[in-house]
Image (tube, grey):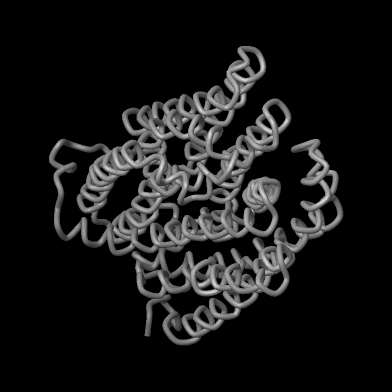
Amino acid sequence: MAVSSVELGTQDIKKLLIKQSVPSSVGILFMSVNILIDTIFVGQWIGSLAIAAVTVVLPITFLISSLGMAIGVGGSSVLSRALGAGDKEKALLTLGNMISMTFLLASIFVLVGLFFSEEMLLLFGANGNIMAPAREFFFPVLFGVPFLALCMVGNNVIRAEGKAKFSMYSMIIPAFVNIILDIVFIKILDMGIYGAALATCISYFMAFLFVLWFFVYKSEMHLAWHHFAFRNTIVKEITTLSFVTFSRQGVVSILAIILNHTLYTYGGEHSVTVYGIISRMLMFALFPVLGITQGFLPVAGYNYGAQNYHRVKESILISIKYAGLLAILIFIVILTFARPIVAIFTNDPAVIAETPNALRWVFAASPIIAVQLIGAAYFQAAGKARQALFLTLTKQGFFLIPLVLILPNFFGIFGVWVAFPIADVLSTLITAYFLKKELSTNLIETEDGKLL
C-alpha cells in the first residue's frame, strides 16, 4: 500500500523506512541487475573489448542524465519540505520548474555530445581498439538520455510523495524491456554492440512513458501550465541543492576519465574491462544499502520541513543501523564468492585472473559505508547544501582521485584497487564527525520535538 505524504510525518519510523526502502531497494536491484545482465550479454556474446567500450561510454551518458538525477534529488528536498510545511503551491511550482530545467539542460548536453563525440570518447578513455565499439554504442544511447533524465526527476518526486512502490515500478520496467531487447537485438538479430545500445535507448523511453502515466493518473501533484514557468526563487533553491548531486556525478565522471586512462596505462585494455565488471558489481551488490539511503531521504526531508526533529534523529540512527548490517553481509559474500562472480561475465583468462582480487580490495571498506551515505543524505534532505556538497565530494573528489593518481606510481595496478578502501575509510571518518556534531548540537530537541 502506498504511503501518502502526510503519513511521512506520522507513521512509526521503522515501519516507514521499511515501506520506503524496500521498494527503492527492489527498484535499484532491478536496475542494477539490468546493467549486470547487459554486461554479461555484451561480454559473452560480443567480447570483453565490448565491456571496455561500455565502461567508457556510460560515464558520459550518466553525466548528462545526472542532470535529471541532480534536479530530482535537490528539487525533491525542496518539495518534501514544502509538503511537510503544508505549502502545496510551492511543491507544485517546484515540480514544474524541475521538469522545465531538466528538459532544457539535457537537450543542450545532448547537442554538445553530438557535435563533440570523438573528443568526448577520447577524453573518457576510448584508447586503441576501444574506440570503434565505443563510438557504435554511444550514439543510440545518447538519444535516450533526455528520457532517462526526466525519469530520474519523476522517480525522486514519486518517492517524495511517499509512493515508493511506483518509484520501484519505474525502475523495473526498463530493466525488463532492456533484457528482452538485448536477447532480440544481440543474440537473435546479431546486431552486436549497436543492438545493445538500441535496447538501452528504448528501455529509457518506456520508463519515461510509465512516469508520465503516473503523473497524469496517480500523483497527488496535479500541474497546471503556469507551474512550468521559471520562478527565480524556486530555481535558485533547486539549483543550490541540485549542485550537490551534479557535482558528485561530475566528480564521478572525472574519476572515470582518470581511472580509464590509468588502467589502460598500467594494465592495458583488459584492466579497463576489469573495472567495468567491478563498477557493475558496486551498484548491484550495494543495492539494499542504496535503497535504504533513497528511502531515508523523503522521511528525513518531510519531518525536517515539519520541524519534527526527534523523528529526523530517529530516522538517521535507524537507517545507519539497517544499512550497516546489510553492508557487512554484502562484504562477506563478495569476499567468499569473488571468483565465481567474475566467471559469469567473461571467459577471458587475463580478466578472470585479475578481477577477483581487485573486487575484494574495492569492497574491503564496504561494512562502514552506511555512515558515509546516510550522513551525506541527511544534510541534503535538510537543505544544508554546503555541508552536503562537502561530504558528497569527500570520497571521490578529495581522496579517491588523488590516490588513483599517486598510488599506481609506487604499486602499479594494485595501487588503483587499494585506493578505494582507503578513500572509503577517510571519507567515512569525516562524515561521522559532521553527523555526530549535528546530532549533538543542531538536533537537540525539547519534549515536543522542536529545536531548542
Q: Residue furthest front?
A: 128
- Horizontal arrangement in the rendering, residue 281 relative to residue 177 (left or right): right
Relative image position of residue 196 (x, y in whole percent)? 56, 27
Residue at 54% across, 68% down: 401
Q: Is residue 307 above or below residue 138?
A: below
Residue at 53% across, 66% down: 396
Relative image position of residue 330 (x, y in whole percent)? 75, 56
Residue 311 visible here: no
Q: Is residue 8 above or below residue 303?
A: above
Residue 259 occupies quadrant: bottom right
Residue 389 occupies quadrant: bottom left
Q: Nearer the viewer, residue 333 or 297?
A: 333
Q: Is residue 196 above or below residue 303?
A: above
Q: Nearer the viewer, residue 31 or 212?
A: 31
Q: How many marks?
A: 0
Relative image position of residue 212 (x, y in whole percent)? 35, 30
- Horizontal arrangement in the rendering, residue 135 relative to residue 68 (left or right): right
Residue 125 visible here: yes
Relative image position of residue 436 (x, y in whole percent)? 54, 82
Name the quadrant of the C terminus.
Answer: bottom left
